Image (tube, rainbow, N blue to C red):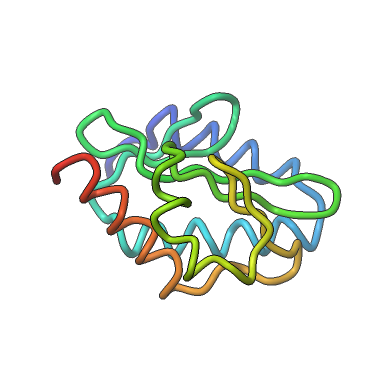
């Protein structure tokens, strides 16, 4: 049985400390990211859970009192998808979504595809 990486343990600890309903929402997002990025490495980046491919951060996520956040690790990603993300509150590097409603798989897929394109993957 393979050892659990330090990054996975840190992400598990982060999520265990998150209150409900944010915890369930972020665990759902984590599962979606793992499904869409099966070769990704889970880690902590800037103090929040993230997934890296070839050492490059592709996606991160976190919680706040009144919202959850998705971080594409690039301000250009959100700008490029502004039409798709119009229903969400967002800034250059952060997409905010409800504490009790995970981002849809379709939206996450577009965010990842845009980041991949940007990195030349």
Task: In the rendered view, tell whether residue 31 sits above or below residue 49.
Answer: below
Question: Where residue 6 appears, x then y in whole percent?
Answer: 43, 27
User: Can you tell which quarter of the image residue 54 is in?
Assistant: top left
Residue ranking furthest to the right: 65
Between 43 and 91, the residue placed more toward the observer is 91
Residue 40 place in picture, x, y as percent: 29, 45
Q: Is residue 61 above or below residue 33?
A: above
Residue at 63% from the left image edge and 52% from the top image edge: 90
Between 89 and 8, which is closer to the camera in this rendering? Answer: 89
Q: Is residue 78 left or right of residue 36?
A: right
The answer to which image quadrant residue 10 occupies is top right
In terms of depth relative to the viewer, which is nearer, 102 or 7? 102
Q: Dividing the image into 4 quarters, which one contains the N terminus? A: top left
Could you tell me how many numbered marks the image carries?
Answer: 0
The answer to whether residue 86 is above or below residue 55 is below
- Left or right: residue 63 versus residue 32 is right
> Residue 94 at x, y = what percent?
59, 45
Q: Nearer the viewer, residue 81 or 33?
A: 81
- Residue 105: quadrant of the picture: bottom left
The residue under the point 63% across, 71% down is 87
Residue name at image x 64 percent, y 64 percent = 88
Q: Position of residue 81 (x, y in %)?
A: 43, 61
Q: Residue at x 43, y 37 (%)?
A: 73
């Amino acid at each position: 049985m393979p050892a659990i990486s330090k990054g996975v343990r840190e992400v598990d600890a982060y999520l265990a400390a998150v209150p409900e309903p944010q915890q369930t929402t972020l665990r759902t997002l984590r599962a979606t990211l793992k499904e869409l990025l099966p070769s990704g490495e889970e880690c902590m980046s800037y103090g929040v859970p993230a997934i890296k491919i070839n050492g490059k951060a592709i996606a991160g996520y976190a919680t706040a009192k009144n919202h959850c956040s998705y971080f594409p690790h690039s301000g250009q990603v959100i700008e490029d998808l502004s039409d798709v993300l119009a229903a969400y509150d967002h800034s250059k590097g952060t997409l905010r979504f409800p504490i009790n409603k995970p981002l849809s798989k379709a939206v996450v897929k577009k965010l990842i595809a845009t980041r991949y394109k940007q990195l030349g993957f």
